[in-house]
Amino acid sequence: MQLGPPVFDRYVAPARLRPQLWRLGLGLGLVLGTYILWMGLMVAIIALMRGADAVEQALGAIGVGDSPGSLVLLLLTFVGMALGAFAATRWLHHRPIASLFGPRAVVLRDFAIGLGIFMALALPGIIWFFATLDLTRGVAWSVWLTFLPLALLGLLIQTGAEELVFRGYMQQQLAARFASRWMWMVLPSVLFGLVHYAPAEMGNSAWPIVFVTGFFGLIMADLTARSGSIGMAWGLHFANNALAILLFTTGEALDGLALYRLPFSASDTEAILPMLGVDVIGMIIMWGLCRLALRGR
């Protein structure tokens, strides 16, 4: 049963050894449980360092990432997600953790290609933002540069963990069990969109943002199938989140290290819908360029 390009069949092959759905269900539970345990460990460390009275305040700050330190801590919570994916892969499916990533050389090369394509496409939009929008300064350059190395490491972990779970673990295991793209490509993308549902911060824009996020996940799933690794999806995801978290933000959350704030909020549906439309068009162009880069594999 060939699902797509030979590189994707090779990528899925390790998952075919133990493709049972009950293993996948337990594995996803293990991912969630490990994430929660890691959060508990971080809370315990905060309590030891700052006292029990500071825990609730710290958790609130981490939840929205509204300061440089809390944003870095929020990104580091995704270590638990990655560890959960590693544990599920090794303990429940008895396959190498490295099989989640794909061939190392391909991962590194495609990460760089995805990062480069995204930044090349984003540059005109960045220039347009500065030229047409009334931007408000966020953090000072000195603060931004001080926290930048930790923030980039945190983004690498956060985006990598999400790719490992949705385009690595889930996509591989579902493709090992089902031939239909609805199962191994669309279903993980729908779930990827749903986990970003945040009505408290996004208001009436929550569902449109879920749709666009799920569409982004669908593109990442297709590129993973075409490349045979999570490298390109990881590079694109990393570049996207770096732009949205470190450069421009709407201010509701994850704004602790943004250099500039946009003159509208994500909950302002009238303002955000046209921006989401432009995002979708940009994603389609980005997908086409990435497919061109993968041509012949």
Image (cartoon, rainbow, N blue to C red):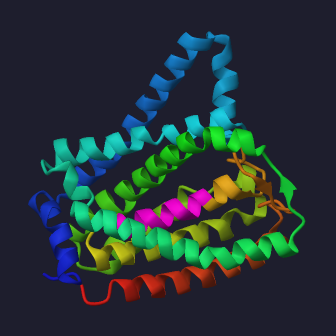
When the figure is inspected, residue 225 is found, relative to residue 262, above or below; the finding is: below
Q: Which residue is more in the foreground, 63 or 288?
A: 288
Side of 287 where 46 appears, left or right: right
Side of 103 where 254 appears, left or right: right
Looking at the rendering, the stretch of residues picked out in magenta corresponds to 231-242
**What residue is rendered at 31% in x and 89% in y?**
295
When the figure is inspected, residue 283 is found, relative to residue 205, above or below; the finding is: below
**What residue is rendered at 22% in x and 75% in y?**
8
Please tell me whether residue 123 belongs to the stretch shown in magenta. Answer: no
Q: Which of the 4 image quadrants contains residue 88?
A: top left
**What residue is rendered at 86% in x and 61% in y?**
135
Side of 7 where 180 appears, left or right: right
Residue 15 makes an appearance in the image: yes
Q: Which residue is more in the foreground, 50 or 170?
A: 50
- Quarter of the figure with the C terminus: bottom left
Q: Main secondary structure of the magenta part?
A: helix
- Quarter of the figure with the N terminus: bottom left
Residue 171 makes an appearance in the image: no
Give percent across and percent down for residue 63: 64, 38
Side of 34 where 99 appears, left or right: left
Q: Residue furthest left?
A: 17
When the figure is inspected, residue 126 is found, relative to residue 255, above or below; the finding is: below
Give percent across and percent down for residue 75: 54, 42
Q: Residue furthest right?
A: 134
Q: Which of the 4 image quadrants contains residue 3?
A: bottom left
Give percent across and percent down for residue 45: 50, 18
Please tell me whether residue 235 belongs to the stretch shown in magenta. Answer: yes
**What residue is rendered at 56% in x and 34% in y?**
73
